[in-house]
Amino acid sequence: MRILLYRGDGIIEPWAHDFAARLPHADIVVWHKGMTPASHAPCDYAVVWAPVPALLDQLAQVKAIFLMGAGVDAVLKFGDALPHVPIVRLGDAGMAEQMAEYVAYATLRYFRRFDEYEQQARQGIWDPLPVRRKADFTVGVLGLGKLGMPVLHTLRQLGFPVRGWSRSPKDLPNAECYAGMESLDDFLSGTRVLVCMLPLTAETTNLLDRARLSRLPRGAYLINVARGAQVADPDLLALIRSGHIAGATLDVFRNEPLPAPHPFWSEPLITITPHISALTLREEAVCQIATKIERLERDEAIDDIVDRARGY
Ligand code: NDP
């Protein structure tokens, strides 16, 4: 069996090492630009992250394409140029816990006013601010999938009223559930902390524009850990500057790294992290992908296959 590996960031050797250790009978081929199909025999499987168009030629004969992450937009953008084989995303693989930590931290930081106390401390100000009530802080999670659901669960355990929005209807204990575009305005109008956990699809691109963000109550806070293109940047900035939105914690951006002149950098009410809310844990990911390859070799079913028509 031959497995092709590629990562857009070039950090591939540790992956090759771990796959070779986990699947000792497999031939691991590390692809790089300039390598032609003739450089090696056709591969049975591909394991990729942030692929480039030149890689597509190499995928013609694979039985499945595995992604080293949960987001699938960077691969589905190739559309019909992709072979008609299963595309398999990572399941949880340790990302749900990281995501829950990140969102819990960002929510608590705003709710407990640590952002304001950080500013005060820099100016030598000692000034206890009024206490906020959790009852006034409904957290709304957009997207109730493998990562969104544990995030909602964690915030509920912290005592926040929670609500979730998804495409198909859900019924969850102690959470208000909303489904479909027609319910989005209602969902937003009662949300104090908005957490975006949606996949990037045609429907979710620019979803959070001025009209939608304005539906949030005054003083609402945004946490985006999904994809930057889901938020209209100028609209968010304008609503923060007008005081309608109190601030945002953003981990993802339309262009990454976030370009130096982008106005988000200089907006004090925006907290920026470099796409780290849930990092792929290599050990877990290699184990999960290798187990799925073994199952496919035995003609057994696997989960986490991407639905191309839905886009996630
Ligand atoms: P899933 O595919 O498991 O779940 C997606 C959720 O979004 C589902 O609940 C789905 O609804 C809902 N959804 C999709 N489209 C719509 C729509 N048009 N309207 C309403 N709801 C919709 O995704 P994950 O939870 O695993 O991951 C979410 C995203 O997080 C990833 O796509 C990726 O972009 C991002 N991510 C970011 C990382 C980071 O480090 N910043 C790391 C990993 C992922 P339904 O349940 O009805 O299908």
Image (spheres, rainbow, N blue to C red):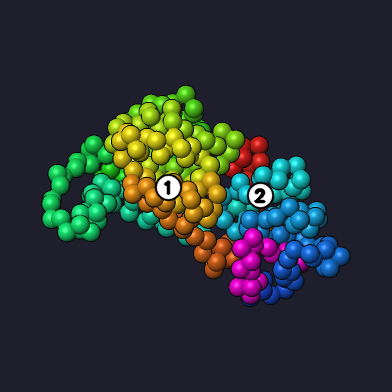
**Residue 239 at least partly seen:** yes
In the current view of this chain or complex, which residue is farthest to the top? Answer: 182
Residue 244 vertical placement versus 130 (above, below):
above
Residue 93 vertical placement versus 28 (above, below):
above
**Residue 144 at least partly seen:** no
Instruction: Write down the region rendered in magenta.
Output: 1-18
Residue 295 vertical placement versus 306 (above, below):
below
The answer to which of 226 and 240 lies nearer the viewer is 240
Q: Secondary structure at mark 2?
A: helix
Quadrant placement of the C terminus? top right
Quadrant placement of the N terminus? bottom right
What is the spatial separation of the Cα atoms under label 1 and label 2, in whole angstroms? 27 Å
The answer to which of 114 and 236 lies nearer the viewer is 236
Residue 287 in percent (x, y) is at: 58, 66
Q: Residue at x 52, y 52 (%)?
A: 259
The disc placed on residue 264 is 1
Which comes before the other along the chain, label 1 or label 2?
2
Residue 97 in percent (x, y) is at: 42, 57
Q: Residue at x 20, y 54 (%)?
A: 120
Q: Is residue 280 left or right of residue 164?
A: right
Membership of 264 in magenta stretch = no
Residue 215 vertical placement versus 53 (above, below):
above
Q: Secondary structure at mark 1?
A: helix
Residue tagged by mark 2?
75
**What kind of residue is marked 2?**
Val
